[in-house]
Image (cartoon, rainbow, N blue to C red):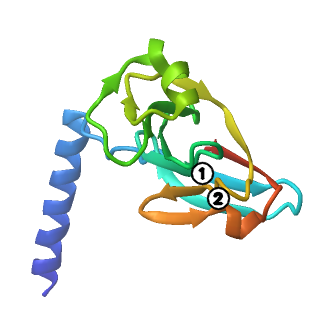
Amino acid sequence: MDRLNSRKLTIIIFLLSITVLLGITIPKVDNKQLKIIVVDSGKLYSYSVNAGSRVVLHYTHSIYRTDIYEVFEISSDSELILREIGIGNSSNIRVGVKDLEDYYMNAEPTIIHDLNIKLRRLNIRIGEIGKPTITVNNNKISLYDIAGFGSLVTIMVDN
């Protein structure tokens, strides 16, 4: 029995030595926390995310009653980077950032891509019509339900 344990220990030491010699390291997990803060009440909701994770804000345009999807990516610097805006449910029209304002203000069905708008925090005033939700790691959170009409919600990323 001791011989078996001794052999296992020798193998483990050998494998660790190879790992050190080759410079193989265990990759660092870049855990961050996406925080949803209801400013008025101080309620805090926190979700684990990593750099590269996607977060989707969905709401209804208050004038045109059209679905708006804003797709953010979590950066390694703990920023929310707006990558894409989808307007309407079905559109094959893709436009660039130069057309953002026209399509967004008129709520024309389209996808605005190639965006690189960096934000440290996102402040959202909760509307009766918009009823925003945020999707993080396949969890859909109703900001309207957790904060209520008229509340201010801040979304940010912490290390």
Position of 145 compared to 10: left or right?
A: right
In this rendering, is residue 9 above or below 57?
below
What amino acid does circle 2 point to? Lys
Q: Give the residue type at disc 1.
A: Leu
Q: Secondary structure at mark 2?
A: loop
Residue positioned 19% across, 61% down in the render = 12
Residue 20: x %, y % from top left: 26, 40
Q: Which mark is residue 118?
A: none
**Number of residues whose C-alpha sits closer than 10 Å to that of mark 2, classed few (under 14), some (14–19) or many (20 or more):** some
Tell me if label 1 and label 2 are in contact, CB under 8 Å. Answer: no
Pinpoint residue 44: horizontal percent, then vertical percent: 74, 62
Count of number-bearing discs: 2
Between 46 and 4, the one nearer to me in the picture: 46
Q: Is residue 130 visible?
A: yes
Tell me the residue at 45%/33% (across/down). 108
Q: Position of residue 70 (x, y in %)?
A: 50, 40
Q: Is residue 51 above or below residue 1?
A: above
Q: Residue furthest bottom?
A: 1
Q: Which residue is mark 2?
A: 131
Circle 1 SS class:
strand
Residue 34 is tagged as: 1
* Rendered residue at 57%/25% (across/down): 118
Name the image quarter holding residue 63: top right
